[in-house]
C-alpha cells in the first residue's frame, strides 16, 4: 500500500509544479497551446491524486475523476495544445469543438455508469488500476485464485467474469481509445516531429532533447496504460511517475533557450 | 536566434548552444534511433487502441 500511495503522491506533486509553470506562461503570453497543456496536465495530476486517495479510502467521485481525467482525457488535452503549434488555428479551433464535445460525452457516459459501480470489490490493498475493469474470462481460461469471480448475463449469454468496479461492457471504456489515439498522435507524434525538424536543421539541440524526453514520457505512460488494459496494472503508478519526471524535464530543457517561445513541443521552425 | 554580430565570447557561447555539436555520436546515432524507435512504439500503441475499438482486443 505504501508504494500505491507514495508513487501517485510524487506524480501529483510534480504535476502540480508543472501545471503552475505552464499556466504562468499562459497568463504571461496568452497562447492557447499553454492553456490546453495546462488543462491536460492538471487532468494528469487529478488522476494521480485520485490514485493516492483511492489507496487510502473509497469515494465514488474520486473514482469518477480518476477514470475520466486520468484514464480517458488527459493525453488528448495535452496533445491538443501541441496541435495549436502544428496546424492552422482555424483547424485547431474546429478540433477544439470536437474535443470539448467528446469530453462532455465521455463525462455523461461516466455519470451514467456511476450508479452501477460494483463497490463491493474495492480494496485499498490493490492499486485502483488493478481493480477498475470487469474482465470477461474465455472458456478454458484459468480462474484467478485471488479475484472475485462471478457469472453474469452479458448480451444474452452467461459469461464468467473477474468483477471490477466498472461493469462489463461499460460504454465509457470505449471512448478512451479515441482520446488516447488522438493524444498519442498529437502529443507523441508532435514531439517526435518537432524533434526531427530541429535535428534535421541541426539547430537548438536542447529542443531536440526536450522533445525526445517529452515523447518518451508520453510513450511510457501510454505503454503503462496499455499494459493496464491488458491486466497488468501494477506498472501504471511507476510509469506515471517516470513519465511525469520525463515530461517535466523535457519541458524545462526545451524551454531553456534564448528564444522567446519555449514550449512542451516548440514551434517546428527553428528560427 | 543569434544575431550576425557575434564577436564576443558570450555570443560565441550562444551560437554553440543553438547548434548541434558536429560529429556527436549522440546526435548522429542515438537521437535518430530514438526517434525511429518511438515512432514505431507509437504506431504499435495506436494499433492496439484501434484493436480495442474494433473489438479485436477484448476489454
Image (cartoon, coloured by chain):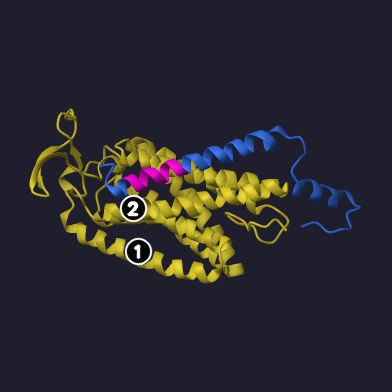
Chain colours: A yellow, B blue
Residue segment shown in magenta: B43-51
Could you tell me which chain the residue with mark 1 belongs to?
A: A
The residue at which mark 1 appears reads as: A102
Q: Residue at x 11, y 39 (%)?
A: A150
Q: Main secondary structure of the magenta part?
A: helix
Pointers 2 and 1 in contact (C-beta within 8 Å) = no
**B7 lies left or right of A249:** right
Residue A178 image-quadrant placement: bottom left
Quick one: A53 or A76, which is closer to the camera?
A76
Q: Residue at x 27, y 56 (%)?
A: A172
Earlier sequence position, callout 2 versus callout 1: 1
Q: Residue at x 74, y 43 (%)?
A: B20
Where residue B2 appears, as percent x and y from the top left, is 80, 56
Q: Is residue B25 above or below residue A229?
A: above
**A113 lies left or right of B24:** left
Q: Is residue A118 visible?
A: yes
**A64 lies left or right of A38:** left
In the picture as drawn, the residue positioned furthest to the right comes out as: B7
Could you tell me which chain the residue with mark 2 belongs to?
A: A
The residue at which mark 2 appears reads as: A176
Give the mark count: 2
Amino acid at each position: 500500500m505504501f508504494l500505491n500511495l507514495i508513487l501517485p503522491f510524487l506524480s501529483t506533486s510534480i504535476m502540480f509544479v508543472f501545471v503552475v509553470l505552464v499556466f504562468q506562461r499562459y497568463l504571461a503570453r496568452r497562447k492557447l497551446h499553454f492553456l490546453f497543456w495546462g488543462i491536460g496536465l492538471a487532468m494528469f495530476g487529478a488522476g494521480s491524486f485520485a490514485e493516492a486517495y483511492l489507496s487510502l479510502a473509497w469515494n465514488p467521485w474520486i473514482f469518477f475523476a480518476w477514470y475520466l481525467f486520468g484514464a480517458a482525457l488527459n493525453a488528448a488535452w495535452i496533445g491538443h495544445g501541441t496541435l495549436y503549434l502544428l496546424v492552422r488555428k482555424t483547424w485547431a479551433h474546429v478540433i477544439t469543438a470536437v474535443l470539448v464535445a467528446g469530453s462532455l460525452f465521455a463525462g455523461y457516459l461516466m455519470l451514467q455508469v456511476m450508479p452501477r459501480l460494483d463497490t463491493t470489490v474495492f480494496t485499498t490493498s490493490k492499486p485502483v488500476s488493478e481493480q477498475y475493469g470487469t474482465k470477461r474470462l474465455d472458456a478454458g481460461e484459468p480462474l484467478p485464485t485471488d479475484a472475485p469471480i462471478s457469472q453474469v448475463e452479458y448480451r444474452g449469454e452467461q459469461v464468467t467474469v473477474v468483477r471490477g468496479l466498472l461493469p462489463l461492457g461499460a460504454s465509457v471504456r470505449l471512448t478512451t481509445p479515441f482520446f488516447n489515439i488522438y493524444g498519442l498522435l498529437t502529443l507523441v507524434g508532435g514531439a517526435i516531429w518537432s524533434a526531427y525538424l530541429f535535428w534535421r536543421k541541426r539547430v537548438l539541440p536542447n529542443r531536440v532533447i526536450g522533445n525526445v524526453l517529452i515523447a518518451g514520457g508520453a510513450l511510457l505512460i501510454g505503454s503503462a496504460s496499455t499494459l493496464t488494459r491488458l491486466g497488468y496494472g501494477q506498472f501504471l503508478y511507476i510509469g506515471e511517475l517516470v513519465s511525469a519526471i520525463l515530461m517535466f524535464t523535457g519541458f524545462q530543457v526545451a524551454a531553456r533557450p534564448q528564444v522567446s517561445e519555449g514550449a512542451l513541443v516548440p514551434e517546428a521552425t527553428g528560427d | 536566434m543569434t544575431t550576425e554580430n557575434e564577436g564576443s565570447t558570450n555570443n560565441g557561447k550562444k551560437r554553440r548552444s543553438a547548434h548541434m555539436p558536429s560529429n556527436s555520436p549522440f546526435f548522429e546515432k542515438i537521437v535518430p534511433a530514438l526517434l525511429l524507435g518511438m515512432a514505431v512504439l507509437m504506431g504499435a500503441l495506436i494499433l492496439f487502441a484501434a484493436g480495442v475499438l474494433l473489438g479485436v482486443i477484448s476489454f
